[in-house]
Amino acid sequence: LAVQVLEGFDPAQPEVVRGNYWLAINRDGSITALTDPIQNFNVLRAAPNGSILFTGNMDQGTGITTFKLDYLRPDGTMTTLWDNTGDTANHFWDIAWVTPSPVSADLTPFPPAF
């Protein structure tokens, strides 16, 4: 189960843009960090044997945004498939399609929380 966590606003630093990050809650109850904090936006989609993560991070000093498309494996390793850096303030990107992952018939259910 992937969960997106949004960092809270800090009134002592109102000019700082807070990031968000993704965690995986595993079937055994353990938690794995999938990403470091991401500024601006991100899209996570299931992909065969892992996930695809599309991010846009803006450098607050220069205003330049770096876009990345990463493949995340279940073991936590990540491979960057594509990146683009530049003056992209007027561009919009999204993931249009990802090959669906087949679901195993013998998938262990999450244990009850109580």
Image (cartoon, helix red, strand yellow):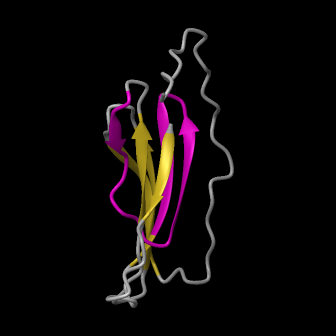
- Determine the residue positioned at 68% across, 52% down: 96
What kind of secondary structure does the magenta stretch mostly adopt?
strand
User: With respect to residue 111, does 15 lie above or below?
Assistant: below
Q: Whole-percent x and y of residue 20?
A: 43, 63
Check residue 46 for magenta coloring.
Answer: yes
User: With respect to residue 88, does 83 lie above or below?
Assistant: above
- Determine the residue positioned at 42% across, 78% down: 9
Q: Nearer the viewer, residue 80 or 41?
A: 41
Q: Whole-percent x and y of residue 15?
A: 39, 90
Residue 76 is drawn in which quadrant?
Answer: top left
Residue 18 is drawn in which quadrant?
Answer: bottom left
Q: Whole-percent x and y of residue 40?
A: 49, 72
Check residue 55 for magenta coloring.
Answer: yes
Left or right side of 48 for 37: left
Magenta range is 29-56
User: With respect to residue 63, does 68 lie above or below?
Assistant: above
Q: Whole-percent x and y of residue 58?
A: 42, 78
User: With respect to residue 67, does 45 lie above or below?
Assistant: above
Q: Nearer the viewer, residue 96 or 113?
A: 113
- Determine the residue positioned at 43% across, 61% down: 83
- Determine the residue positioned at 64% across, 31% down: 100
Query: What is the number of callouts on the image?
Result: 0
Left or right side of 70 for 36: left
Furthest-top residue in this view: 106
Residue 74 is drawn in which quadrant?
Answer: top left
